[in-house]
Image (cartoon, coloured by chain):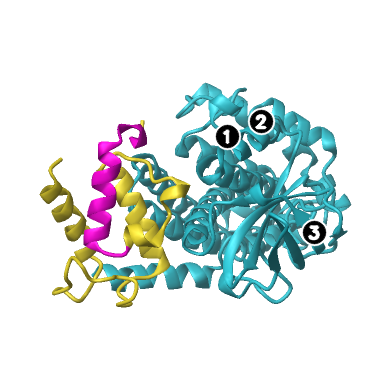
Amino acid sequence: METGEIRETIRSFIGGFIRARNFKDSDNIFEAGFINSLFVMQLILFVEKKFSLAVEDSDLNIANFSSVDALSSFVSGKLVNGSSRLH
Amino acid sequence: MNVATDNPPAAQRRRSREFIDRVIGAHAEAFDLEQEVPRGVFDALAREGVLGALVPAEYGGTGLDPLAVGLLCEDMGRASASLLSLITVHTMVSLAIARWGSAAQRTRWLPPLARGETLAAFALTEPDVGSDVKSVATRVERKDGGFVITGTKKWISFGQVAGLFFVVGNCEGKLAAFLVERDTPGLVVEPIANMLGFRAAMLAEVRMNECVVAGDSMVGSLDFGFSQIVGSVLDHGRYCIAWGSVGLAQACLDASLDYSEQRTQFGRALKDHQLVQRMIADMIVNTRAARLLCQDAARARAEGGPDMIIGAAVAKYFSGTIVEKLASDAVQIHGANGCSSSYPVQRYLRDAKIMNIIEGSAQMQQMMIAQHAYQRW
């Protein structure tokens, strides 16, 4: 999957939960108060399913999930590393 | 019976249920009365692969799929809500270690958990902290490369016999989870008896006074990582109790059908009285609806993805709520007999109340479901 497609997929999912439709890819969704802990769990499950990758304990860093930009980079990095794929 | 098979066929499901009925159901009243479960029952459950239900095969477990786990919980709930809680907490800890634990933690703990050599308990609740997880008062301090834990946990299911506690504490102002062994110096287990329901769940208060644990005993990481770990574990707990409530509801229905066929009043069987039929009809419809919601939750889990969280919350809320009404109606149909220890429905009613409290009360599920809706739409 191309980087642009990854970003658009993530943006579409997050956008479905955030009422502020004009949020930017660089916006920190935690600091902006857009989301709650339930959403973060759903976000992780979405990433795992959509991109067929495993989010591991060492990945549970808030910086990886703080914005569309950050999550796109995180997913791209995981996909490059094929060992993180779900089986 | 071997619960290892995914989506068990009817014959296997029947064997599984027969095993649970023989080993647990037939003795559930005695367990409830004595407020204790003999060690041999745990061993039997381990031999059948039940205790390794959430442990991957490479660590000696049976690694059941979501539907198989659900059906197991339904059958356990039908036989004994207390033993359902054993499966719930034991698999919650197994899941936490299998999904989020380090390689060393998986190697150290998953095989004995699957074999039942070690029983696990989930130690989150405190005397002053229940649903409000962020207010956990148990204090954890770093010291000499390890951690020192001080605090009290309460209402810990099977805490009386657990060899491993999954302890949630506050470390440096952030929440974290730790694996604490029973024989850790400073750890004291005090049995809790005479609860309303779940009397055979061998509840305990666990007091930790400066318990020193190794630096690698933390599961996952502080704060953000902790939230996801505990969130996923509590989600599994909700899923187990939802299915278990369906099992208990089915037990209420079965008992009511039997009794209303045999009991005669005013010259005819209770089943021929229309107001009894009304209760039976509601019991059938609600049990079926709850089971369908649980099956929907199982499908969402099998598919993976974000919908599984709300699926479990919806199933837990509905199942936990209707089982209270079913159990109350079951006692109503049995009349004075239903209030005596000669019939199991009095136990069902006591246990049903607990179902609607543990692993997230009905009100917590309502809040989660509504908040999700407002966020999504």
Residue type for callout 3: Cys
* Residue B121 - label: none
* Residue B111 - label: 2
Pointer 3 or 2: first along the chain: 2
Q: Nearer the viewer, residue B173 or B131?
A: B173
Residue type for callout 2: Pro
Q: Which chain is yellow?
A: A
Figure check: B221 above or below B175: above
Figure check: B17 above or below B359: above
Highlighted range, magenta: A66-86
Q: Which residue is mark 1?
A: B55
Q: Secondary structure at mark 3?
A: strand
Chain containing the residue with disc 3: B
Say if labels 3 and 2 share a chain: yes
Residue B249 percent location from the top left of the image:
58, 52
- Answer whether labels 1 and 2 touch (C-beta < 8 Å): yes
Q: Nearer the viewer, residue B299 or B375?
A: B375
Residue A85 percent location from the top left of the image:
33, 35
The CA distance from mark 1 to mark 3 is 28 Å
- Residue B3 visible to an observer of this rendering: no
Q: Residue at x 58, y 43 (%)?
A: B97
Q: Secondary structure at mark 1?
A: loop
Q: Colour of chain B?
A: cyan
Q: Residue at x 20, y 67 (%)?
A: A26
Q: Which residue is mark 3?
A: B211
Residue A70 shown in magenta: yes
